Amino acid sequence: MSSNQQPQWAEGSSLEQKHQSEQLQSQLVANMQRFGYCFWGSYLLSTNRSSVFSGHHGQLSLTAVFLDEYRDRLFLGGKDVLYSLMLGPTSSESKEIYWPPLPGNREDCVERGKEQNECANYIRLLQPYNRTHLLACGTGAFQPMCAFIYVGHRGEHVFTMDPTNVENGRGKVPHDPSLPFASTFRGGELYTGLTADFLGRDSVILRSMGGRPSMRTETDEKLLHDPKFIAAHLVPDSDDRDDDKVYFFFTERAMEAGGREGAIHTRVGRVCANDVGGQRVLVNKWSTFIKARLVCSVPGPHGIDTHFNQLEDVFLLRTKDERNPDVYAIFSTISNVFQGFAVCVYRMADIREAFNGPFAHKEGPDYQWGAYEGRVPYPRPGVCPSKITNQPGREFASTKDFPDSVLHFARSHPLMWRPVYPALRQPVLVKANTPYKLKQIVVDRVEAEDGQYDVMFIGTDTGTVLKVIALHGGNSLETEEVTLEELQVFKVPTPITSLDISVKRQALYVGSTAGVAQVKLHRCETYGKACAECCLARDPYCAWDGSSCTRFIPNSKRRYRRQDIRHGNPVLQCVDQNLSEDVEVAEDRVVYGTENNSTFLECVPRSPQATVSWLVQHNDRKEEVKLDDRVMSTEQGLLFRHLLHQDEGVYICHSREHGFTQTLARFTLEVLHGETLDELMGRDNAGYPDSLKDRSTGNYRGWLPCGSYSRSSSLGQIGQSRLWFKDIMQLIGPSNLPHVEEYCERMWCNEKLRRKHKSMVEKYRQAQEGGRKARSKGSSERNRMPRDLSRWEE
C-alpha cells in the first residue's frame, strides 16, 4: 500500500556555540521555565538552519536510511513504513509504502512474551539490488521478512511493492529491532553480521542470496564471542576481483585478555568474497575468516595507556585508490572512572600488514598467549583462491581445493597476534567528561587553498552534530582539534542514529527516531562580514573573496581569495585591509537590573577557538572584570548571581584568537533599587477601578483577568507599558517574579496575541516534556517531535 503527497518538514534550529556550564544552565533554565514562553518559540524560528522530515503522520521511528545520489532520492525505513523522498531542486515530493507484519504475526509475537511496541515491522535494511529495485528487510514482529521495492529508473519517481511477494528474511536482519547488525550488498549477494535467532544468541557472519550456497561461521567462541557488529564493507585487495574481501568491524569479549574476565576488544575481521567452504572440513562454513584487534588509546602515566575499547561507529572514506580507503572509527571507554570518546583513523595497509603477520596461539589452558612460531600450511589461512595465490603445480580453483590442514589451522587460529594501530599511533580527536556521547561519524575530504582537509561530522546522543577538523603540526605528532561548529539539529534532544553526506547536494542528512534532517555542510555567511572573521573561522569550505565570506571552489579563476586553515592568521591574510574598520562594530545596548537579583550579559564568539575577556568602564577608566563566586564568566557570557549597585558601568566583551582582538558587545548596565520597580508598577496601575484592588493589602491584584483590562479602558496604558516591557524583562529575579508575571499577562491580553501566546506555551511545554522523557524512558519511547510541521526548504 503506497501513498503520494508533499512531505511535511518540521523546522530545526542552529546553535553555533558550546554547551552551557551546569551552573549557568541551572540559573537560566529556572528562569526560562517561569517566563521563557515570552520569547523561546520565536528564538527557535529565528535560528532555523535545518529541515526535518517526520513522516506523513508525524511519527517516523526511523530505523534505516539509504541515500541514492544517482537517482537524487533519499529512501527511509521506519516502523511499518517506507518513504521515498525526491532531493531535486524543483521537486519536494514524497511517496509512502505501508508495510506491516504479515497477518497473525503481530499477535503471535505478543503471545511469545514480546512487548506490543516491539511487535511491528521495523525496516532495518535498505540496499540497492539492481538498477530498478531496492532490497528492503524488516523485523516482521520477530519474524524477519524481505521484499523488493520497485523504484524505477533515474528521473522517475516510482515507489511500489507487491505485498504478496514477500520472502523470509531470517539471516538478513535480526529478529529484535533493538539488536545491532551490519551488512553490505555486492554482486547480488548479501553479507551480514548479526544474531540470527529469536532469542538473539546465535551470532554469525552470513552470506545469503545470489547463486552460490549460503555461508556462515561455525558456532565457536574462538571465532565470535558475544559480538556486537558495527559495520561491513567490501574492499578490493588487488586488481584481481577474486581477491576481494569483506571486512567486518565489531566488538567482542576477548579470550586472550587473560584474567580480565569480560574484557571487550574491538576487532576487524574479514572473509574472502569467493569463499565456498571446504570439501570435507568446514562444509558451507567460512574457511577464510580471520580477525585482528583494533587499538585506539592515548598514553597515560607510568607507561600505562588509556584504551578506548568500545566501538561506536565506523566510516570508510573512499579515495581515488579504491583499495586504500581511510577507516574512521569512534570509540568509547567502558571504565567506571570517567566517560571518554576518541576518533582513530586506520590505514588499510596497516590492517593488511596485521593479517599478513603471525597468528595468535595458546598451547593449552595453563599457557599464555603468544605468536605462533610453527609451520604455517600453504596456502596461508585467510588468503583467497586467486591468481595471486596460485603457483605452478599448486593451483586452487576454489576454497574446496584447499588442503584439510589449511582448514584445520584456520579453524583453530582465527586471531592475529599483532594488533592494528591508528595512524600516528594516537587518536585525532579525544573527548572526555562531555555532556554528550559520540555516536555517529561521516567524513568529507575538502580541497582548500593549502591542501586537503578531512572534515568530520560527528553525531551525539543529544541531537547535536559536531563539525571538526584535526590539524597535524609539521614533524610533530601532536594534533590540534578545531571545532568549527556545533549544530543542534532537533528541537528535542534525541540520539542521532545515522549520518549521510551528499557531495552532490553539499548536504548532511541526519537521522534519529524523530525523523531525518537535511543540513547544509557549510554556511560561510555566518562567519561574519570581515576578512579577519572569515579567516579565523578556519573552515575549509569557506574563503574571503574580497567582499564576503563565500564557498571556496578549487581551481576557481577568482584571484582574490584569502584562507588560512592551518594557522588562522588574519594579520597575514588580511594585511592589505584595515582590520579595525573592516570588522563590524559592536552595538551599544542598555541593560537594566535590580539589586540582589541575577543579571546576564550574553556574549558568544563566532569562533569556538576564541577566548573571551571582559572589561568594565567606570567614567573614563577601564579595568578587567574581577571574577569570583558572585560574578562568573561562562561560555555564554557574564553572569551576575547577586547584583550590587556598584556593578553599574559599561561592560565590553572582547574576543581574541591568533593575536587578533575584536569587540563583540558593549553593555551599559544600570542597577535599579527595588523601590524603583514598585513605583513603576504603581504608576502603571493608576487609573484602575477599586474593584480590582486586593482588599487584604490595598494593592492591585497580580494576574488581572484580560476582561478586566479591557473593561477598565486601559488599552492605552498597556500599549505604553510595552515600550518599557523589554527593560522590565531585565529585572528578572525571585523577589520580582509576580510583577513580571503580571506584565507577561498584560502583554497577551489582546485576543490575537493571546492565541499566539497559548500556541507558544504549548510548544514550549511539549519541548520540556520531551526532554524529561528523553532522560527517563528508553529509546523506543523518547523524543517525540513537536507537531509544528513545514515543507522542505532548499
Image: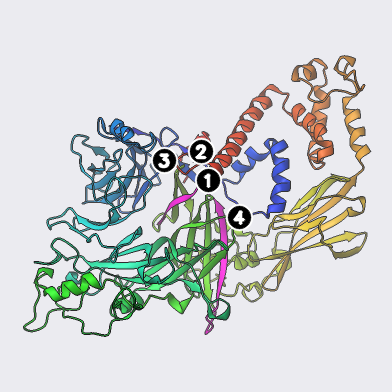
The mark lying in front, picked from 3 and 1, is 3
Q: Amino acid at mark 2?
A: Met
Callout 4–callout 1 Cβ contact below 8 Å: no
Label 4: how many residues lie within 10 Å, few (<14), some (14-19) or many (20+)?
Answer: some
Picture coordinates of residue 283 (x, y %)? 13, 62
Q: Quadrant of residue 313?
A: bottom left
Color scheme of the displayed model: rainbow
Q: Name the disc covering residue 61, or none.
A: 3
* Residue 318, above or below 756: below
Sequence-wise, the earlier of marks 4 and 2 is 4
Measured Cα–Cα span from mark 4 to mark 1: 14 Å
Sequence-wise, the earlier of marks 1 and 2 is 1
Q: Name the disc covering residue 16, or none.
A: 4
The mark lying in front, picked from 4 and 2, is 2
* Residue 195, above or below 396: above
Q: Amino acid at mark 3?
A: Ser
Residue under circle 2? 785
Q: Residue at x 32, y 38 (%)?
A: 121
- Which residue is nearer to you in this view: 364 or 105? 364
Residue under circle 1? 490
Measured Cα–Cα span from mark 4 to mark 3: 27 Å
Label 2: how many residues lie within 10 Å, few (<14), some (14-19) or many (20+)?
Answer: many
Q: Residue at x 77, y 50 (%)?
A: 600
Is disc 1 placed on a helix, strand or loop?
Answer: loop
For the record, the magenta segment spans 473-501
Q: Residue at x 39, y 66 (%)?
A: 266
Q: Amino acid at mark 1?
A: Phe
Q: Amino acid at mark 4?
A: Glu
Callout 4–callout 2 Cβ contact below 8 Å: no
